[in-house]
Amino acid sequence: MSQIKNNFIESVGNTPLIRLKAASEITGCNIYGKAEYLNPGGSVKDRAALALVKDAQEKKLISEGGIVVEGTAGNTGIGLCLLGNSLGYKTIIVMNDNQTQEKKDTLKNIGADLRLVPPKPYKDDANYVKGAGRFADELKVASNRGPNCQLSVSEIMTILVMFQRIGFRNFKTFYKCFLQNYLHEYFPNLPSYHRFIAIMPRALFPLTVFAYSNGGSRKGIYYIDSSCLPVCHLKRQKRHKTFRNTAKFGRTSVGWFYGLKLHIVTNGEGELIAYSISKGNSHDSKEAHNILKGLKGLAFGDKGYISKNLYQSLLGKGLKLITRKRKNMKKEPLSDYENQLLKQRNLVETVINHLKHYYQIWHSRHRSPINAMTHLVAALSAYAIEPLKLSAIKLLNN
């Protein structure tokens, strides 16, 4: 009676050791073979299949009536299908069509939904493993269309800001390897990666409001600057499609680029005050009218903001724009205080470099303009939450 198993799962593993008599006598020591062929599926892969299913159950990635999709050469698929039959899961197996007929017949006979594909190397997108992954994602998208499995806007915002703060360089890796594996309990309605990409733009406007509402205090000292946002390498601009209607050629102090421009205003402590996004060929002085609107006091910028009309317009509204002059221009007398603050203009450049290298504003592989803007605003929101600890006034005192 002790050999009777209560269910299929109990029969996986615990295979016997068999002493290999001839090998033991020749070597003078006891050599044993593990009889993994006595697993119910006929191979050691039953153990791996059981571990995969248990892990998915613990992470609540699958429930009764769910679907298991696996790209396999045969034995793992057999083990998964047998376990699925026992636990109430449907099993879909994606396999190369050049596998043995015996494996194909076995999988069909035990109830697997067998999908055969032509053999391709792993680097090819048509490889059976990658094909199984895409098929699984498509099933998730189809099953996650109902209202009960969609994330709230606040959850979408949290995920996007978390990605910017946590240091991952690739959002897909962050979502699939970190978020789905370790934080699923905090986001119980977490959809598939592709479904999340589809609903991500819902957070664009709320993130924009969040970035502005969590910006720095207005104390009368401001710094303005811009940075290029290349959308592709110059050599690929003719083939680029995502930003074809919005990206333009622009030039910075280090050369030409193809893409957009980010314009930001910070206060004297490095906190974000305002920002805007323009085409790559937009002149800095034109954008300054919008993002400096409503500010009063002193604003400092580089030579790109030299404009008599801009200066007069802002001065009439209570904001004095101070820039370095070109060599052929008459220098306007500045007070010692204004001159020292102008020398600290690299404060805003420090903020921009931080956004470029710590956050994901220089990412150039977006497939959707609106998703690219959502990621950009998420990065600015993340910075607004925890800005750099800078201070032009402290620098002056030092």
Image (cartoon, rainbow, N blue to C red):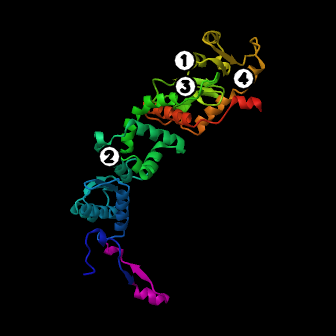
User: Height in image: 145 above or below 230?
Assistant: below
Question: In which quadrant of the rendered view does residue 84 lie?
Answer: bottom left
Q: Secondary structure at mark 3?
A: strand
Question: Rounded to the nearest whole Å, what is the CA distance between mark 4 and mark 3?
Answer: 20 Å
Q: Residue at x 58, y 29 (%)?
A: 216
User: Height in image: 41 above or below 233?
Assistant: below
Label 2: few (<14), some (14–19) or many (≥20) C-alpha neighbours in 10 Å:
some
Question: Viewed as shown, does residue 290 lie left or right of 319?
Answer: left
Q: In this orientation, does residue 63 appear?
A: yes
Highlighted magenta segment, given as a residue range? 19-39
Dot 1 and dot 4 residues touching (CB under 8 Å): no
Q: Which mark is first along the chain, 3 or 4?
A: 3
Name the front one of labels 2 and 3: 3
- Residue ID for mark 4: 342
Say which mark, if any, is on residue 275: 3
Q: Residue at x 34, y 64 (%)?
A: 50
Say which mark, if any, is on residue 140: 2
**What's under tag 3, amino acid-wise?**
Tyr
Question: Rounded to the nearest whole Å, what is the CA distance between mark 1 and mark 4?
Answer: 21 Å
Dot 4 and dot 3 residues touching (CB under 8 Å): no
Q: Nearer the viewer, residue 60 or 200?
A: 60
